[in-house]
Image: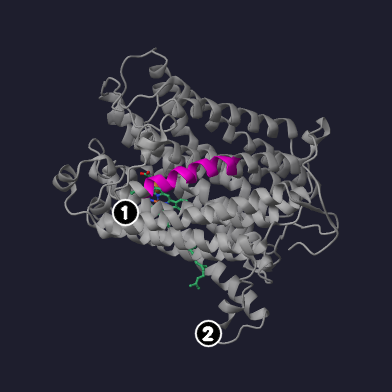
C-alpha cells in the first residue's frame, strides 16, 4: 500500500468552497459520517452482548441509555441503516465516476448527503430522548415519535438519489462509447440502485400512508399486519442493498489486491442480475409465523428465497477461483498452497477474505431460515441475530473496514496509520463475530429468545421464563468483547489515518481488477445491458407475489391503537 516517503505531520486543511466540487471530498464525507455512526453503534453492541451473559449495564449509563430497548434501537438503526446508507451511497457514486472517468452530478450527490444527515439527526434525537425505543424494525402498534418516522423517511428518500446520479453518468459514457458494454463496477452499482428503488417502495408506502400520518396524529389507529408486510417488502431486499456493494469490492477490486484477476466478468454480472430479480419478491419469509398470509404464498416465497441463494453460490465459485488464480500466480502450489500464498499481511485483503469465510456460515444459516418449516424452530430466537452478524457484520462491515485501509489513503493522501494494528483489528473483529455467531446459533437452537432484556430479570423469573442460563450466552458476551476490541483497534487506525501523516509521493490508486474472461463477446453481458427490461421483470415478479399477499389485508383492515411499553 503506502510506501515509505517523506512524511510531514499536517492537520486536516480547512474546508473551502472548492472542496465541494471534489468527488473525493464527497466520498470522504459519506464514509466518515457512516463510520462515526458505526462507532456509536458497535459501542452499544458490547452492552447487548453483556446483557445475554446476565450483566445489566444500562443502569450505569443514565441519562444516555435508560433501557436495553433504547440501546438496541440505537444499535440497530445506527449500524444497519445509518452506517450502511452513508457508506453505500458514497461508494456507489464514487467508484463508477472513477471507472468511467465521468463527473457525477455534485449538486444531487451533496443533496443526498444533506438530506440523509437531516433524517439521521431527526431519528437520532428521537432515539436518544427515549421517545422511540421501538427497535430497528419499528413494528406498530409500538409507537415512537414523529421525529423518528419522518427522519427515517428522509433517510430512505435520500438513499434513492444516487440512482439518477449513476444512471446519468452511465448514459453519458454510453453516448461516447456506442456499442460497448457498461464497465463492470458501473453495471453493478446501477443494478444495486435499481433493485433498491423497487425495494424501497414498501417502506416508503408504509411511512407515507401509515406511520407518518399516525405519528402526526392525522389518523388514530394503524394496521400492524399491513405495516409489517410493507416493512418486509423493503426489509428483506435491504440485506442485498448491504451485500451487493460489498460484492463490488470482492469481484471487481479484491482479485487485483491479491495479485490476480477476476476469472469471469459475465458470471459476476449474472450474479448481480439474479440478485436484482430474486431479492424483492421474497420479503414475507420474515413473516412465516405471522397469521394473515396464506400457506400457498408462504410456499412460493420459500422456493423463491432458496433461489436468491443461487447468485451467492455463483459468487462463492467465481471468487474462490479468482483467489486461487491469484494464489497460484504468487507461487502457491498443491491443493491449498494458493490459499496460504494470498497476501495475508495486507489488512485490506485479510479483511475481505475473512469476511468471505464467515459468510459461508452466515449464508448457510440463511438457507435454513429460508425454509418455512425450519424457520419455525429458529424464528425470534438468538439464531437470527447470529445469522445477521455473520452476514451484514462481515460482508458489509468487515469488507468496508478492509476497503477503508486503501480508500482513506486514496482519498486523503495520508499514510495508513499502523498497518499492523489494522491487521490485528480485522482478525479480532473476525474472531469476535465468529464466536458470537456460533454461540448465538447454538443458544437459538435451544430456544433463547432474541430481543430479551434478560439481564434485568430476577434470577427466579428468568428461570421460569427461559430455563437454565445457557453456557453459550457467556460465549456470546466474550465474542462481543473481542469484536469490541477489534472495533477499538480499527477506529484508532481509521482516525489515525484521517489525522495522520501526509504522504506526498505514495498515491494509492483504486485497484480495479482485470478479467480473464469477458466482457466482450458474452451473451450474458449483452442481455444484462437491458436494465429497463430487468427492472420490469423484477417489478412484475414483485407485484405477482405482493398483490395476492396484500389484497386480503387491504380488504380486511385491522385498527390498532399505539402502545408505549418502555
Ligand atoms: Fe438473511 C433474516 C434468509 C442472506 C441479513 N437476514 C435476516 C435478518 C437480517 C439478515 C438482518 O428466509 C434479520 C432481520 C430481523 O431483524 O428480523 N438471508 C437469508 C438467505 C440468504 C440471506 C436465504 N441475510 C443475508 C445477507 C444479509 C442478511 C447477505 C445481510 C447482508 N434471512 C433469511 C431469512 C430470514 C433472515 C428467511 C428471516 C428469519 C426469521 O425467522 O426472522 C442468502 O442470500 C444467503 C446466501 C449465501 C450463501 C453463502 C455463499 C458464500 C460465499 C463465500 C464464499 C467464500 C469464499 C472464500 C470464496 C449461500 C459467497 C474462499 C473459501 C474457501 C474455503 C475456499
Ligand atoms: Cu430476508
Total residue callouts: 2
Q: In the figure, is residue 348 to the left or right of 147? A: right
Q: x%, y% of residue 531?
A: 60, 46
Residue 11 occupies quadrant = top right
Q: x%, y% of residue 226?
A: 33, 30
Query: What residue does disc 1 label?
Result: 383
Q: Which mark is residue 307?
A: none
Specify the farthest residue to the top: 218
Looking at the image, which residue is at 64% across and 33% down?
113
CA separation, marks 2 and 1?
Answer: 34 Å
Query: What residue does disc 2 label?
Result: 335
Residue 488 seen by the camera: yes
- Is 527 one of the magenta-colored residues? no
Q: Which residues are magenta?
A: 34-49
Q: In the figure, is residue 94 to the left or right of 70? A: right
Residue 524 seen by the camera: no
Label 2 packing within 10 angstroms: few (<14), some (14-19), many (20+): few
Q: Where's the N terminus, which quadrant?
A: bottom right
Q: x%, y% of residue 521?
A: 68, 64
Asked which secondary structure carries label 1, the reply is helix
Q: In the figure, is residue 28 to the left or right of 489? A: right
Looking at the image, which residue is at 25% across and 24% down?
556
Asked which secondary structure carries label 2, the reply is loop
Amino acid at each position: 500500500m503506502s510506501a515509505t516517503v517523506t512524511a510531514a505531520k499536517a492537520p486536516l486543511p480547512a474546508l473551502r468552497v472548492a472542496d465541494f466540487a471534489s468527488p473525493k471530498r464527497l466520498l470522504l464525507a459519506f464514509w466518515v459520517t457512516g463510520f462515526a455512526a458505526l462507532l456509536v453503534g458497535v459501542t452499544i453492541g458490547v452492552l447487548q452482548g453483556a446483557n445475554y451473559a446476565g450483566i445489566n449495564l444500562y443502569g450505569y449509563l443514565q441519562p444516555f441509555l435508560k433501557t436495553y430497548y433504547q440501546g438496541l434501537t440505537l444499535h440497530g438503526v445506527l449500524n444497519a441503516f445509518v452506517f450502511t446508507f452513508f457508506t453505500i451511497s458514497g461508494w456507489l457514486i464514487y467508484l463508477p465516476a472513477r471507472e468511467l472517468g465521468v463527473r457525477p452530478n455534485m449538486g444531487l450527490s451533496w443533496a443526498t448527503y444533506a438530506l440523509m444527515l437531516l433524517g439521521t439527526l431527526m431519528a437520532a434525537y428521537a432515539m436518544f430522548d427515549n421517545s422511540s425505543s421501538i427497535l430497528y424494525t419499528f413494528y406498530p402498534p409500538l409507537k415512537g415519535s414523529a421525529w423518528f418516522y419522518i427522519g427515517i423517511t428522509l433517510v430512505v428518500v435520500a438513499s434513492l438519489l444516487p440512482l439518477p446520479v449513476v444512471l446519468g453518468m452511465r448514459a453519458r459514457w454510453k453516448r461516447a462509447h456506442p456499442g460497448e458494454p457498461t464497465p463492470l463496477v458501473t453495471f453493478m452499482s446501477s443494478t444495486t440502485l435499481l433493485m433498491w428503488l423497487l425495494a424501497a417502495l414498501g417502506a416508503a408506502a408504509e411511512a407515507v400512508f401509515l406511520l407518518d400520518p399516525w405519528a402526526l396524529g392525522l389518523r388514530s389507529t394503524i394496521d400492524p399486519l399491513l405495516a409489517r408486510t410493507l416493512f418486509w417488502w423493503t426489509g428483506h431486499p435491504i440485506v442485498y442493498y448491504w451485500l451487493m456493494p460489498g460484492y463490488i469490492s470482492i469481484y471487481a477490486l479484491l482479485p487485483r489486491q491479491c495479485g490476480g484477476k477476476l476469472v469471469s466478468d459475465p458470471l459476476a454480472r449474472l450474479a448481480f442480475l439474479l440478485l436484482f430479480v430474486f431479492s424483492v419478491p421474497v420479503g414475507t419469509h420474515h413473516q412465516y409465523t405471522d397469521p394473515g398470509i396464506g400457506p400457498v404464498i408462504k410456499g412460493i416465497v420459500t422456493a423463491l428465497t432458496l433461489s436468491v441463494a443461487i447468485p451467492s453460490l455463483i459468487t462463492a465459485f467465481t471468487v474462490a477461483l479468482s483467489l486461487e488464480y491469484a494464489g497460484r500466480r504468487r507461487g502457491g502450489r498443491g491443493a491449498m498452497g494458493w490459499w496460504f500464498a494470498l497476501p495475508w499481511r495486507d489488512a485490506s485483503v485479510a479483511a475481505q477474505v475473512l469476511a468471505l469465510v464467515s459468510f459461508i456460515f452466515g449464508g448457510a444459516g440463511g438457507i435454513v431460515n429460508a425454509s418455512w418449516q425450519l424457520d419455525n424452530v429458529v424464528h425470534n430466537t438468538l439464531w437470527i441475530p447470529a445469522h445477521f452478524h455473520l452476514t451484514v457484520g462481515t460482508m458489509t462491515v468487515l469488507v468496508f473496514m478492509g476497503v477503508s485501509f486503501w480508500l482513506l489513503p486514496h482519498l486523503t493522501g495520508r499514510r495508513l496509520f499502523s498497518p499492523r494494528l489494522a491487521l490485528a483489528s480485522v482478525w479480532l473483529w473476525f474472531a469476535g463475530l465468529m464466536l458470537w455467531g456460533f454461540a448465538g446459533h447454538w443458544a437459538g437452537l435451544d430456544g433463547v429468545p432474541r430481543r430479551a432484556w434478560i439481564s434485568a430479570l430476577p434470577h427466579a423469573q428468568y428461570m421460569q421464563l427461559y430455563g437454565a442460563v445457557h453456557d453459550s450466552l457467556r460465549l456470546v458476551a466474550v465474542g462481543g468483547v473481542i469484536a469490541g476490541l477489534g472495533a477499538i483497534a480499527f477506529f484508532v487506525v481509521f482516525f489515525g489515518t484521517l489525522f495522520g501523516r501526509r504522504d506526498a509521493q505514495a498515491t494509492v490508486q483504486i485497484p480495479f481488477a482485470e478479467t480473464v474472461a469477458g466482457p466482450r463477446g458474452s451473451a450474458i453481458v449483452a442481455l444484462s445491458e437491458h436494465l429497463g427490461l430487468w427492472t420490469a421483470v423484477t417489478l412484475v415478479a414483485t407485484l405477482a407475489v405482493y398483490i395476492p399477499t396484500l389484497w386480503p389485508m387491504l380488504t380486511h383492515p385491522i385498527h390498532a391503537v399505539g402502545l408505549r411499553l418502555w
